Image: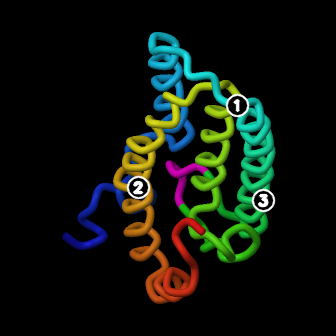
Amino acid sequence: MTADEQPREERDTAGVIAPPPLIFLAFLLLGYVVESVMPDNNLPSALQWLGALLIVLGIALGVAFERALSQARTPANPYRKTERLATTGAFSFSRNPGYLAMTIVYVGLSLAADAPWALLFLIPALLVIHFGVIVREERYLERLFGDEYRSYKGRTRRWI
């Protein structure tokens, strides 16, 4: 199938299965529900403080992610057409700084809320993010930017 034969929305976006923040939120809430019915495992307060620190670090990385996309003049919204390839700022050390930021915040919220059961749901969340979002975005960016994206992909790690 040529690019002209593909449905327009398939050509112009990555075709992710759901907004990534909602994927993380759904699994986090599911973890909190399980936490509410399972025996309490009280985390040490040091881990709860670590959770608070991770929330701050994750938010800071999220801001850097948004700033890098803004400077590249391309949208963060996966349902909009990518205009340019972002490779600087947060994208200079991770191809997915936004998902890394959301993962860090997720872990931080689980620890700070004393919800270790919620951490178990991070694994399926990351699998959905990988197969339903990242793999699709990478195919889309390769189709859109070709060798420029392949070169970036070769020199920059997916996560960290």
SS label for mark 3: helix
Residue stretch in magenta? 77-81
Which mark is nearer the camera, 1 or 2? 1
Coordinates of residue 104 in the picture (x, y in percent): 65, 48
Pick whichever, 14 or 121, lies toward us. Answer: 121
Looking at the picture, tell me which residue is in the foreground, 37 or 12: 37
Quick one: label 1, few (<14), some, or many (20+) residues within 10 Å? few
Residue tagged by mark 3?
64
In the rendered structure, find residue 101 and report the number of the disc placed on it: none
The residue that disc 2 covers is: 130
As measured in the structure, the alpha-carbon distance from the residue carrying label 1 to the one carrying label 3 is 31 Å
Residue bearing the label numbered 1:
44
The amino acid type of the residue labelled 1 equals: Pro
Q: Earlier in the sequence, mark 1 or mark 2?
A: 1
- The answer to if 79 sits in the magenta stretch is yes
Quadrant that contains the N terminus: bottom left
Residue type (three-letter) at the residue carrying disc 3: Ala
